[in-house]
Image (spheres, helix red, strand yellow):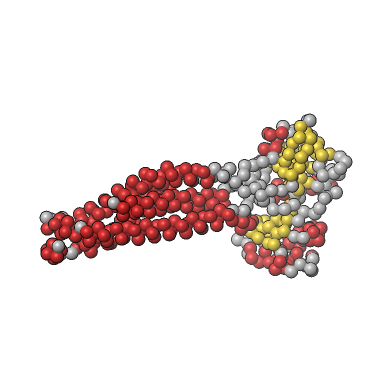
């Protein structure tokens, strides 16, 4: 009985880990493939120093000479990051807070983010005296902002105008819901130059060659910069960095799952060896009485399948609680699919059946007369 309990515990752990590991992997895949509300295709980003950022027009002009480059824009930092500049403003007698993301005038068009009310930025906005705002829908709905209102921007004197509202998009990891955001044009008196370059390439472009060109062009503008030191990356690769913790956790839990399965199979193998030796006489009698090899194998497989099923019944609610708690840490999460639980059950049943059948086959095919004579 103790041996069966031990194997059952191993099955319970294995099934639970398979379910949990599958959901961790599905959640990571979901986050990397989720529609974040902007165009991520053929997108390269590069962070440059202040010297290069001050020469943004010169850098952009040189890069546009490459026919493989479709468009270019600039922003103040990476598009997706844990946090950015937070602004607090007094609006209609109440304090409101939002994140602010300074961008170039063509940023929304470049990223495929539609303006749902009002107008998009124009190139002339970069010559405004006090800056220009476009808020996302969340900010509009939460604070009740309206078009053509004015509120303090980055200038000590004079207010910036609200010219439009854009569709919500994810600008932090999918652990967080969309919060109020202002896209902002500094105007003719910027605090600092925009230091993040975004490059959209043509489809089927030579991406490594374009990335190399960006790095060498940056070095040409600022000779103190080594091309190898320029931070040029594909946007999707940089996005993966936002979920490095999840990637590491996924690898770790997968490793533990494999170890648990191996230990379970070793336990099953040992128990089957013991059972076949202990029940050799029973097997011989059954064979003499007309039982086929298939019936003997079926008998042992059913016994172990029952253990697996009992463990699955216990593991299912336990795993659901663990998975639900894990997924609750994400604002955007994959549904808890029933098929994952069934897949874990079928996987353990299939592997167990292979081990049991392989080990029992030898005992079932022994000459029953020889077996009974030995007994």
- Give the quarter of the image for residue 157: top right
Q: How many marks?
A: 0
Residue 248 screen position, x and y as percent: 55, 57
Residue drawn at 65 percent across, 60 percent down? 233
In front: 219, or 270? 270
Answer with the quarter of the image where residue 375 lies.
bottom left
Q: Which residue is most to the top?
A: 93
The image quadrant of residue 211 is: bottom right
Q: Quick one: 356 or 22, which is closer to the camera? A: 356
Please give left or right for residue 367 compared with residue 159 in the image.
Answer: left
Residue 33 screen position, x and y as percent: 56, 51
Q: Is residue 55 left or right of residue 7?
A: right
Q: Nearer the viewer, residue 243 or 189?
A: 243
Q: Residue furthest front?
A: 2
Residue 196 in the image: state x and y as whole percent: 73, 56
Query: Visible in this render: residue 11?
Result: no
Q: Is residue 364 left or right of residue 337?
A: left
Viewed as shown, does residue 291 lie left or right of 192?
Answer: left
Residue at horizontal 77 percent and vertical 60 percent from the top: 49
Residue drawn 81% across and 58% down?
Answer: 54
**Residue 222 visible to the viewer:** yes
Q: Position of residue 72 (x, y in %)?
A: 72, 55
The residue shown at (76%, 40%) is: 88
Residue lying furthest right in this view?
157
Instruction: Check the image and report above or below for 333 versus 200.
Output: above
């Amino acid at each position: 009985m103790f041996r069966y309990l031990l194997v059952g515990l191993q099955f319970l752990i294995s099934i639970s880990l398979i379910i949990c590991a599958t959901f961790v992997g599905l959640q990571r895949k979901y986050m990397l493939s989720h529609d974040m509300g902007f165009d991520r295709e053929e997108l390269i980003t590069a962070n440059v120093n202040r010297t290069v950022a001050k020469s943004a027009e010169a850098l952009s002009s040189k890069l546009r000479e490459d026919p493989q480059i479709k468009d270019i824009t600039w922003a103040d930092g990476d598009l997706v990051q844990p946090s950015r500049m937070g602004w607090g403003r007094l609006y209609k007698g109440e304090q409101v807070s939002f994140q602010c993301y300074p961008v170039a005038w063509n940023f929304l068009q470049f990223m495929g983010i539609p303006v749902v009310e009002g107008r998009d930025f124009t190139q002339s906005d970069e010559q405004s005296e006090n800056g220009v705002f476009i808020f996302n829908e969340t900010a509009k709905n939460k604070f009740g902002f309206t078009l053509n209102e004015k509120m303090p921007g980055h200038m000590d004197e004079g207010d910036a105008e609200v010219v439009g509202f854009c569709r919500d998009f994810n600008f932090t990891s999918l652990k967080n819901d969309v919060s109020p955001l202002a896209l902002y044009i500094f105007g003719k008196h910027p605090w600092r130059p925009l230091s993040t370059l975004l490059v959209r390439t043509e489809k089927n472009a030579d991406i490594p060659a374009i990335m190399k060109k960006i790095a060498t062009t940056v070095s040409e503008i600022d000779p103190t910069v080594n091309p190898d030191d320029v931070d040029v990356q594909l946007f999707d690769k940089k996005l993966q960095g936002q979920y490095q913790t999840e990637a590491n956790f996924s690898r770790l839990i997968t490793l533990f799952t494999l170890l648990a399965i191996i230990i379970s199979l070793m336990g099953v193998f040992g128990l089957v060896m013991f059972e076949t030796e202990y029940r050799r006489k029973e097997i011989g009698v059954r064979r003499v009485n007309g039982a086929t090899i298939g019936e003997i194998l079926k008998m042992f497989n059913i016994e172990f399948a029952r253990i697996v099923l009992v463990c699955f019944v216990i593991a299912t609610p336990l795993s659901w609680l663990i998975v639900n708690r894990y997924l609750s840490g994400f604002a955007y999460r994959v549904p808890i699919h029933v098929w994952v639980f069934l897949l874990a059950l079928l996987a353990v049943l299939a592997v167990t059946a292979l081990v049991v059948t392989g080990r029992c086959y030898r005992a079932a095919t022994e000459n029953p007369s020889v077996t009974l004579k030995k007994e």
